[in-house]
Image: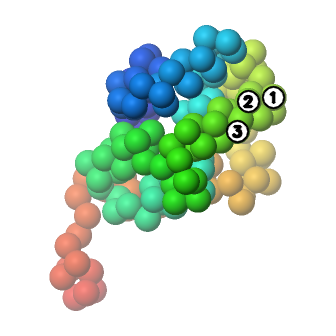
Amino acid sequence: VEPYFSLSWVITWFSHDIRDIARASRLFDAFIASHPLLPLYVSVAILLHPHNRYSLLSTECEFSAIHTVLTNMPLTVPPDFDQPSEFDQYCIDTAIQYMEKVHPKNLISLSRRYRKGLLKPLIGIASEISIFRTPPAWCFAAAAPTERVLDEE
């Protein structure tokens, strides 16, 4: 799935998806007072939260199902948070930690190295990071066999 699902997150600072004024205001405060790429890092924090990651990886491998899960992630508050504002603060804090680990000035060179395949040795070392693993071939199939066909095989 291409990252188009998160384009509105970054462009509108999540206000397209989060309609609660208090939540949107907290995010706007953080984005105004920080680095211009904080919305990108918050997007990553939302995607990599264990609950959201599990939801995504347990979704059937079909474009519309995956897209639905991804587009609803900013609205979905994981069960380990009592209030949506706690999740928002968690995402902001986590995004700042990500920003400290992978500085924004390194993102372009890192993405170039990734596209050229120069990071494959590092990805092999970091095998516990499943988001970097090559997806199985069936994810790229134009159509998946039905359950009946799979049972017959």
Label ID, residue 55:
none
Circles 3 and 1: CB distance less than 8 Å? no
Which label's residue is closer to the chain start, 3 or 1? 3
Q: Residue at x 76, y 53 (%)?
A: 126
Label 2, on which residue? 96
* Amino acid bearing label 1: Glu
Please determine whether, in this image, residue 56 is positioned above or below residue 42.
below
Of residue 76 and residue 110, the one placed in the foreground of this image is 76
| Residue mark closest to the camera, 3 vs 1 | 3
x then y, percent, for residue 113: 69, 28
| Residue mark closest to the camera, 2 vs 1 | 2
Label 3, on which residue? 94
Q: Residue at x 71, y 60 (%)?
A: 128
Q: Residues within 10 Å of mark 3 (few under 14, many from 20)?
A: some
Secondary structure of residue under mark 1: helix
Q: Residues within 10 Å of mark 2 (few under 14, many from 20)?
A: some
Measure how far apart labels 3 and 2 are at the Cα level: 5 Å
Q: Is residue 85 visible?
A: yes
Q: Residues within 10 Å of mark 1 (few under 14, many from 20)?
A: few
x then y, percent, for residue 86: 60, 43
Q: Residue 100 vs residue 56: left or right?
A: right
Please determine whether, in this image, residue 24 is positioned above or below residue 94.
above
Q: Is residue 7 visible?
A: no
Of residue 25 and residue 46, the one placed in the foreground of this image is 25
Label 1, on which residue? 100
Q: Residue 117 vs residue 62: left or right?
A: right
Of residue 39 and residue 86, the one placed in the foreground of this image is 86
Chosen colour scheme: rainbow
Measure how far apart labels 3 and 1 are at the Cα level: 10 Å
